[in-house]
Structure formats: C-alpha cells, structure tokens
Image: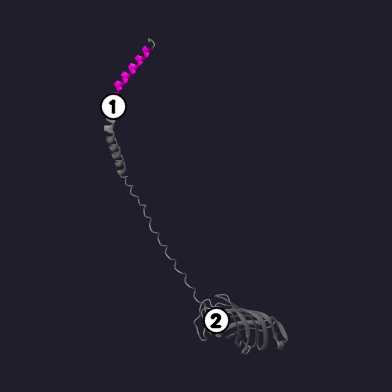
Amino acid sequence: MKEDRPKMKTQITFNSMANRARPVLAGSLALAALLLPGVAAAIEDKSAATASVTPPAPAPAVAAPALPAPTATPAMPAPAAPAPVVSEADRPDGSLKWTPGADTSRWSLNFTPVLVMAEGNYRLGGGVDPELKYTLDRGGVCLSAGLRVGGYYAKNLFGITTMPTIRLMVPVGPVEPYVSFGMGYGWLPKLDHSDIATMSRLGVVFRFSKSFALGVEGTVQRIEGSEFKFPSFGSALAINF
C-alpha cells in the first residue's frame, strides 16, 4: 500500500497539469483558427504584388557614331592616243606635207649632169655619173650606200671612174641637204693610166613628191697619179622606186 502512494501522487500531479493546460491549448487553437484566414489573405496579396511589379525598362541603345562616307577617287584621264604615222606610200604624189616619224627608207637612182669650167689651157668640160643607192631612214637622219659610175671630160682628158659611195642626209621637211663620199678606181684611156679614184660631194635636193626630187651639188674628184683632178658643179636628179 505504501508502494502505491508515489504512483498515485504522480498520477494526480499529471492530471492536475493536464487540466490546467487544456484551457490554454483550447484558447491557442481558437486564436489560430481566427488568424488563419487573415494570414492566407496576406500571403495572397503579397504574391499578387510581387507578380504585378513591372520590370525596369531597358536602357536605350546608344547608336554607334556614323562613319564618314568614302571619298570618291578622281578618275585618271585616259592617255592620249598616239598620232598616226603616215607611211611613205600613203603620201599622194606632189604633196609637200611631211609627217614626222614616217619611214622613208627606199631605193633610188641619182643622175647628176656636171659642168667642168675651163681653166688656163684646159677647155670646158662636163660629164655624168649615175648612182644606184639604198637609203635607210634612221629617224631624222638618213644613211645611204650605193654604187656610182662616172664618165667625164676634164683637163683635156676623158676619164672613167667607178666606186661605192656613202651618203648622209638630214631631211628638213621636203628639203634634204647631204654630204657624200666615194672611193674606187679610175682610168684615163688616152694616157693608159689607172689608179685610185676619190670623190667628195655636197648638195641639197628638194623633194616634190615621194618619187621625185631635184637639186644642185658641188663635187671634187680625182684619179691619183695624174692631173685628172677637178671641181664640178651640176644638177641632182633623184628618182625613188
């Protein structure tokens, strides 16, 4: 019996605490029941406020600075077309208008009647010396090479010469001044004499067309080892092929 007293005392204490806690718990539950709708409404208002917040507008884009328009490169002027070159064959006969730079290389036949003046005991004389030559146009200067044969009466003697020749011409429009030189062989039949023959000549011709020119020239020629040495003066006739 004494052993059951503590147990009973504990039971009585527990029951007393439970009886005291029951009103407090009931009041708490009632207060929770009253506050629960308000808490739910507050949560819903907070959610709606969060959803209605408008995100800030993005910052306006900064436009990149405009680049200057490319400057047009000025067009280079087209090169001038070269002046057409008129060949020798394109010049009409009788035309005195010459185009610079035209090639006048050609074959030609020169015919030069000469007059040998009387001197002391020597009578008046004369002769002819045809020459076939080819002229090479080098642009402002013309070079010729040819073959010349001459027959003369001078110093009361008849002489014959033959020789290759060279000629240098510097044309100025239709006017062609020139210098010529030749060296070959000569004969004096009356004296039965033959030796080296030489010729030096200065002249000028005026070209009337591509195939015909006329001028004057002076010549000094001789046959070595004899008195056959004389100056002569005559006309110059040139026919181009």
Q: Can residue 234 be seen in this view?
A: no
- 26 and 212: which is toward the camera: 26
Closer to the chain start, of discs 2 and 1, is 1
Horizontal and vertical percent position of residue 223 = 68, 82
- 203 and 36: which is toward the camera: 36
Seen in the picture, residue 100 relative to 192 is either above or below; the reply is above
Magenta residues, start to end = 4-29
Give the amino acid type for the residue marked by disc 1 in the picture: Ala
| 31 to the left or right of 144 | left
The extreme right residue here reads: 192
> In this figure, which colouring scheme has been used for the structure?
one colour
Residue highlighted by disc 1? 26
Horizontal and vertical percent position of residue 77 = 44, 68
Give the amino acid type for the residue marked by disc 2 in the picture: Glu
- 65 and 149: which is toward the camera: 65
Residue 88, numbered circle: 2
In magenta segment, residue 14: yes
Check the picture and name the quadrant holding the C terminus. bottom right
Label 2 to label 1: alpha-carbon separation: 140 Å
Image quadrant assignment for residue 181 = bottom right
Q: Is residue 194 visible?
A: yes
Horizontal and vertical percent position of residue 100 = 51, 77
Check the picture and name the quadrant holding the N terminus. top left
Q: Does the magenta stretch mainly form a helix, a strand or a loop?
A: helix
Seen in the picture, residue 64 relative to 146 is either above or below; the reply is above
